[in-house]
Amino acid sequence: MHFSKIIINWYSINKRILPWRQTKDPYCIWLSEIILQQTQVKQGLPYYKSFLDRYPSVFYLASADESEVLKLWQGLGYYSRARNLHATAKHIVENLDGKFPDNYKDLLKLKGVGDYTASAIASICFSEETAVVDGNVYRVLSRFFGIDTPINSTKGAKEFKKIAQELIDKKQPANFNQAIMEFGAIKCTPNNPDCITCPFNSKCIAFNKNRISKLPVKIKPTKAKKKYFNFLVFITEDGKTILEKREGKGIWQNLYQFPLVETNKNIGIEGFKDCVKNHDLLRHISYSLSLYNEDVIVHKLSHQHLYTKFWIVNVPTLHTSNKVSINKIRDFAVPILIGNFIESFNF
């Protein structure tokens, strides 16, 4: 039996029941695919439901404020996805009469939509014969065919796309794409894959040559940079604090944070007092400073590790436009690092 027939048959028996598999509405498929980038199904599912409850169509999403979208996205990380989601919704409503492009080529033109997402929408919603290639697909194909080409290389991306395109079932492109992704997600898993009952084990090169743990091959990323973040958590006698909106490019763009002091190393309280004595927010006021977390909080991002301390600054009052009531602090979209502190401090 052909590869595509076997995997589609497996999928028909073993697939998980997921809400985005009950529809071919491109808005729902697009939303699910953006959420599931860099996110596992278990984590992404409640966000998908929350977004559809709040924004049941692209028109509702387009009319929302970006701050609302970022707040709802909070905890998923990679916030550029949320910003692109909102920008694309506005583009579709304002320039495309609220209709998604119905083909791979035009879907690629949407902000935040790459080869994988365009292929998923085009095949699932419009039955276009274009193969998806995500982490699960890379893993299945590299093991089955015994391919050593690094999956995060330009050569690898082209090679695996070509193979997937050759394998796709032309009569059932949607089922094939969903089948091979599902197979990688729950059968051909990164660790401890279920090879014994795998329908491909007799022909799988990695299984027969004992190379399961060695495939797929991935070029190791450069070592993450260390950064030392010190957040000033102001608390006034009348229940105010300061939140600042991050401007400019960056993963936390347009999110809110406490005033940040970045140092070149981890420093103690005396060193930090000396560091901030001329800080604009502290220079002309009386205050007391204390460290909230004795143990540094290490927040790991893909390209950098943030060694973080939260400093409590008690002051009588504040004279700044950035002050907000502490009882409204949870209304703001913040990075998960800040959100976790807010919950643990329990303002």
Image (tube, helix red, strand yellow):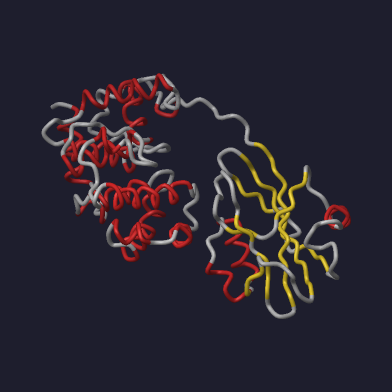
From the viewer's side, name the closer residue of 39 and 60. 60
Outermost residue, left side:
171
**Residue 134 percent location from the top left of the image:** 35, 35
**Residue 265 percent location from the top left of the image:** 78, 44
> In the image, is 69 to the left or to the right of 123?
right
Residue at point 25%, 56% (across, down): 19
Residue at point 35%, 22% (across, down): 158
**The C terminus - image quarter:** bottom right
Count of numbered circles in the view: 0
> In the image, is 208 to the left or to the right of 173?
right
From the viewer's side, name the closer residue of 182 and 328. 328
From the viewer's side, name the closer residue of 77 and 277. 277
**Residue 331 percent location from the top left of the image:** 52, 69
Image vertical order of residue 10 relative to residue 313, above or below: above
> In the image, is 87 to the left or to the right of 326?
left
Outermost residue, bottom side:
238
